Image (cartoon, rainbow, N blue to C red):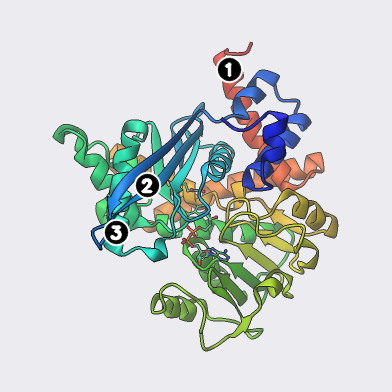
Amino acid sequence: MIVKTPEQKKALKQGMLANVMRQFDNVADIIDLNPNIRKILEVTNNELVVHFPVRMDDGEVEIFTGYRVQHNNSLGPYKGGLRYHPTVDIDAARALAMWMTWKTSLAGLPYGGAKGGIQLDPTKYSNDELQRITRRFTYALGDNIGPELDIPAPDVNTNPQTMAWILDTYMSTKSPAERSTNMHVVTGKPIGAGGSQGRDRATGYGVFLNIKFWAEHKNIDLKDKRFIVQGFGNVGYWAAHFLEKEGASMIAVQDAYGSIVNEDGISVEDLLAYTKANKGSIMGFAKAETLDNVAFFGLDCDICIPAALGNQITEANASSVKAYLIAEGANGPTDVAAEEILLKKGVAILPDILCNSGGVIGSYFEWLQNRNGEIWQLDEVLQKLEKKLRESFIKVVETSESRKIDMRTAAFIIAIERLEEAYVQRGIFP
Ligand SMILES: NC(=O)C1=CN([C@@H]2O[C@H](COP(=O)(O)OP(=O)(O)OC[C@H]3O[C@@H](n4cnc5c(N)ncnc54)[C@H](O)[C@@H]3O)[C@@H](O)[C@H]2O)C=CC1
Ligand SMILES: O=C(O)CCC(=O)C(=O)O
């Protein structure tokens, strides 16, 4: 359960869970949310913590801890990614699961919210070890996931290969008849294993589209605009790819290994090719200089795209931000204290639950195709994605402008009011 007593609250470190709870409480107060529905939404439905043994390449057995938190399923099956990272713990999974509920609700999808992962540093394990870890984790999750119950997807340090291992392991526990109808137990799969065209780029493309919609709304031409990206993985790379195609220039990048800068621009494709040959790291890229990590968010630029972890823009660095737009590719990259500072400075923030929702929308398209035995072309997927994202963007901007509130508050209001309506219409709280 999400911590609620004063003692627990006091003990709670200022992490993502504290942020998502403050965001929720703020909006619940503004919309005067039905108190019974508030009680339901402020706790998670189910929390699974599993400890499981895996044999390492050297023959030793290591015990791993995995998590799956299912926050709410009043709008449909639980949906959300799996993260492999040392910072994964029960509070991180709770926070990320809650954001998923708001995200799927805002996007108008028939899904609830969940998140999970394994607390580990994947750079310390071989590919074979990661495969065995993923398969044992899937066995440990058992029937707590399922195509109509809870559908995982990729997140930090997981990818289509990870999803294929999960699919294969899950299938191996099913009867032959069930195997062909369970393909949609995970999304973000490789195309050959039932994945959808476009899911690879869906999140980053969605981040780009949100920036483009915002720029059009403000009559700003993206050509020659300077942007910085934190995280050059799935989300960061694809967002940068599409922005560069639009004529904008990437002047700095930060990843888990450090930061690089080139005021004249860094070629997105050259950097991708370099990272592929350099164990995923941007460091040492010849056409840029090394930059102190602390200076990164204070760089002179137009657009800042945090696309790595949570709580990256905080009270400590928010005042130094020079960008006039922050497009949140990551979940929870801006904490509540930082947001207050940024909004006072006039910085616009495209909130995570809107800005990175292209990923889960792309997953929904994959799930639908698997469920209905359909295969869609790339252009069809991208067109449908753009249509859905534009609808969400318009709703958020209209709510923000008519109620004179920031875009995060507007997005949360739309998401939480949809959930409230579902509970009220079902008659649970007449
Ligand atoms: N993959 C997806 O479809 C979606 C991902 N997101 C969010 O986007 C963010 C990034 O996810 P992915 O791109 O999928 O992960 P990824 O694993 O593909 O890439 C993560 C990137 O962040 C960097 N990074 C890790 N720790 C860092 C640190 N302390 N400082 C700076 N950079 C660091 C890594 O080096 C890597 O470049 C996460 O917050 C995730 O929850 C949100 C929606 C969907
Ligand atoms: O594609 C999905 O189902 C969820 C992706 C995700 O974890 C996220 O949107 O944060």
Mark 1 belongs to which amino acid? Gln
Residue found 38% across the figure and 42% down from its top = 51
Pointer 3 with pointer 2, Cβ within 8 A = no
- Residue occupying the point 79% across, 57% down: 342
Tell which circle, 2 or 1, labels the residue nearer the N-terminal end: 2
Q: Quadrant of residue 334?
A: bottom right
Rounded to the nearest whole Å, what is the CA distance between mark 2 and mark 1?
Answer: 30 Å
Image height check: is 53 above or below 250?
A: above
Q: Residues within 10 Å of mark 2 (few under 14, many from 20)?
A: many
Relative to the observer, which residue lies in front, 369 or 134? 134
Determine whether the residue tagged by mark 2 lies in a helix, strand or loop: loop
Label 1 residue SS = helix
At label 3, which amino acid type do we have?
A: Glu
Q: Residue furthest bottom?
A: 286
Please provide percent x and percent y for residue 211.
Answer: 63, 60
Q: Which residue is mark 2?
A: 187
- Name the kind of residue labelled 2 in the image: Thr
> Residue under circle 3?
129
Task: Please provide percent x and percent y for residue 111.
Answer: 48, 34
Q: Is mark 2 within 8 Å of ligand 2?
A: yes
